[in-house]
Amino acid sequence: MFRYYLDLALRSLKRSKGLTALMVLTIAFGVAASMTTWSVFRAVSGDPIPWKSSKLYVPQIDMWGPGAQSADPDADKGPPDALDYNDAVALMRDHRASLQSAMYMISPSVVPARPGTHPINVTGHAVFSEFFPIVDMPFLYGNSWSAADDEHRAEVAVISSDLNNKVFGGGNSVGKTLNVEGRDYRVVGVIGKWNPQLKFYDVVNTGGFYVDSEDLFIPFNTAIAAGMPNDGNTNCYKSPEKGGFEGLQQSSCIWIAYMAQLDSDEAVQRYQDYLQGFSRQRYSWTPNVRLRDLMDWLDHEHVVPRDTKVSLLVALGLLIVCLVNTAGLLLAKFLRRSGEIGVRRALGAPRSAIYAQFLTEGGVIGLAGGVLGILLTGIGVASVGVVLPKDIADLARLDVSLLLTTLLVAILASVLAALYPTFRASRVQPAWQLKSN
Amino acid sequence: MALHPILAALRRHKAGVILIALQIALTLAIVCNAIFIIGQRIQRIQRPTGMNESNLFMITQLWVGAPTGDDQASTDKLDAMLRTDVTTLRNLPDVESATAVNTLPLINSSWTNGVSLQPKQQHSTAHAAFYFGDEQMLHTMGLRLIAGRAFTAADVQHRGFRAKDQPPIIIITKALADKLFPKGSAVGKSVYLADNTDPTTIVGVVERLQVSSADSWTNSFTWYSVLEPVRLNSNFSRYLVRAKPGRLQAAMKEAREALFAANPMRVIDDSAEHNGVKSFADIRARAYRADTGMAILMGVICVILLGVTGAGIVGLTSFWVGQRHKQIGVRRALGARKVDILRYFQTENLLIAGVGAIVGIVLAIGLNLWLMHRFEMDRMPVLYVLAGVAVVLALGQAAVFAPARRAANVPPVAATRTV
């Protein structure tokens, strides 16, 4: 029966080529515009580490006190979004989460061992050893450094395979020496395929997205001892008393990101209580602390650019208009065939048969629109790179799931659009139609 | 023309009429807001920074194995390296002037601080972006001094990147001067920077200088800039260079080579995305790329939307014309002229589009209010809505013309034929 309806649908669509083309194009454009913006939105708002994002938490402490609050009553009264050095070190010392790491962004220069090569500037982070299990870092060679290395300020480094290729020409470089800012670091690990599009562990300094990959990780304490200054943002309520990187460490300026892994609800509750106590012990004012989980934190930091949300909404609006448009055209097309419907009904076809026939026709239009829509979405995603900033455009990609969604949305949209016209068609009175002809 | 027969006919096609009116309403609502967004973005992209931007380029470099600049000796060493680089650049044949700067408008690397009228003020009077440079800074940037004086070589100090900031004199922008001293001139007055207890004297006012980022967080102080006569010493440095007219490309090439020749132990990126030598035109294009992208995207969506709606009107009207073939014949046979038939369909469309537009106005304003609430968008001027109404009405008339003319060409003899 379905094949019969399919045949009927194709015949009917062939009969009015102009109208059919119009409907197919409408669906295709509507779906392609929505899918293109969706691909961008999905890329920037997706969960960067879905398997454990609910276990990752970012603690916030108010180290500036109520005096630093903005006079604006509507302003966010939450604590600052990064930590100063003293609090970060104290939190690390207390070590109350199952895994935790303070971190700051560095961008030192590295001198390649191979003669005749220029020094290069790399981006990375100074972290604690527990950072690697927190982000589930995959290692190609070697492993992370140990907690003892953190303690002893060992001069060790974990490097990306990209940097490994540049400096050592690839291969297992564990044990080799890397010259960072004139000091020798022993390579203990080479990272495998790992380059999260969203630098979720340090949104404050990276802004979430940036084009650079992370090439170098060294122990936090070692970087501090070596006086390796921070790259990224520094935010001060009061200027440091003393100048220099050392002055920054003694100040209440915030420049350190922090991430803790908490495995159960009780652990979260315990950590929350701990933060309250921590703040009460260190500061005279009422504790103003927060413990946000990763997705909540990303939302708080407005990691998804506003433009992306607005354009997705506008594109969805376009899809709705296309839906309404298709519904109008289908209505015209179906009711034009009132005579044919009358004959079918008079010959004994039940209403459900009319439904099946016309919804099949709607589905066929959706399929055609979807196939064309996939093509247009491909063009759309390819041209996103021309108009959007590279860091965001790079994330939007055409993959199988996007293609399938496009097709599905197109078919669903056109069947939805066909519902009302089909309902009207099924209400056609056979006797009246036969008489009037 | 009497509206009665049109209304009577429309009543027989309620669903179709409602769908097309709804479509026009939605189109109007979206197109108005999209065009408003485009207009705002274009305004943003076109605003001048206050600098003379032609022939300007910026060099960012990093010295390898340089001291940290945290103590006096290493600061002095870094300053000597910095001055050598500036001299190297100034001596190039295609270079008009050069200066060391900490940042520039639009490059998104910011140094901001509070400016207060009293020491130890709880909340500063204004928040401003800070630019550090030597006596050639004003000239190289191409700023227009409108009061007071420029910096002289004797004013210029140098200090480490993280040393405490307590300059004796500054130059500020007119916008900041007006904010701090709404009455009278700012020149000669004292202000307190950050939480300094020592006053700083304003010696000059420049007409305009945008802050160093075009991101939304700077929207509240876009034109509040402060210039300090200071060379900042760090292991990295930025140079702003003005090439001789028409010699920009040559100067950019020369500058890179000359700096490496003077001291090879440095990093000047040369990838496409992170080039250490960038023309200001390039910096501007990058800074506003997201805005350009948004404007283009909104433009594309508007075009598709209007196209779809226009095509929808053509399709539906064609269907109605086909359906009323016989009635049109009857009217023609009873003496209606071709132009009457044409007018009939045009009026019908105007009626539907008019109703759609009225609903659309409400939707457009509602959508704008919602966007204001959710995404901190500005209020849309009524002009945009009126322009949108004109556009959809014109679109309706243009779309209906072809099917209406076909209807007008139905011969009177059609009345006598059965369908």
Image (spheres, coloured by chain):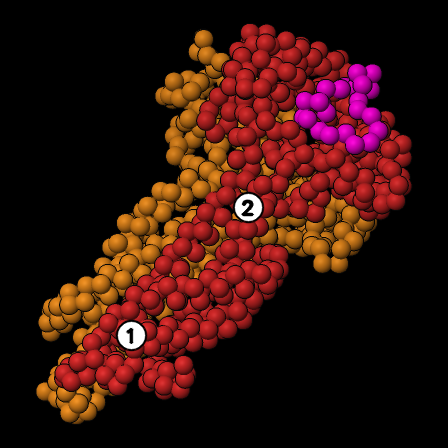
Could you tell me residue A53's position as x and y percent?
A: 49, 50
| B74 on left or right of A151 | right
Along the viewing direction, whichever of A105 and B230 lies nearer the viewer: B230
Confirm whether residue B236 shows in the render: no
Dot 1 alpha-carbon crowd within 10 angstroms: few under 14, some 14 to 19, many 20 or more: many
Whether discs 1 and 2 lie on one chain: the answer is yes
Whether residue A36 is visible here, answered yes or no, is yes
Number of the label disc, if any, that sits on residue B42: 2
The amino acid beneath tag 1 is: Lys
Tell me the magenta residue range: B135-158
In the image, is residue B138 part of the stretch drawn in magenta? yes
Which residue is found at the position 51% from the left and 21% from the top?
A: B269
Q: Looking at this view, is B9 or B368 the one in front?
A: B9
The x and y percentages for residue B253 are 51, 15
Is B383 situated above or below A161? below
Chain A: its colour in the image is orange
- In red, which chain? B
- Disc 2 sits on a residue from what chain? B
Q: CA distance from mark 1 to mark 2?
A: 46 Å
Q: Nearer the viewer, residue B221 or A236?
A: B221
What residue lies at 73% left-to-right and 16% top-to-bottom? B75
**Which three-letter amino acid code belongs to the residue tagged 2?**
Ile
Q: Is residue B68 left or right of residue B355?
A: right
Residue under circle 1?
Answer: B338
| Residue A76 x %, y % | 69, 54
Which circle, 1 or 2, is nearer the viewer? 1
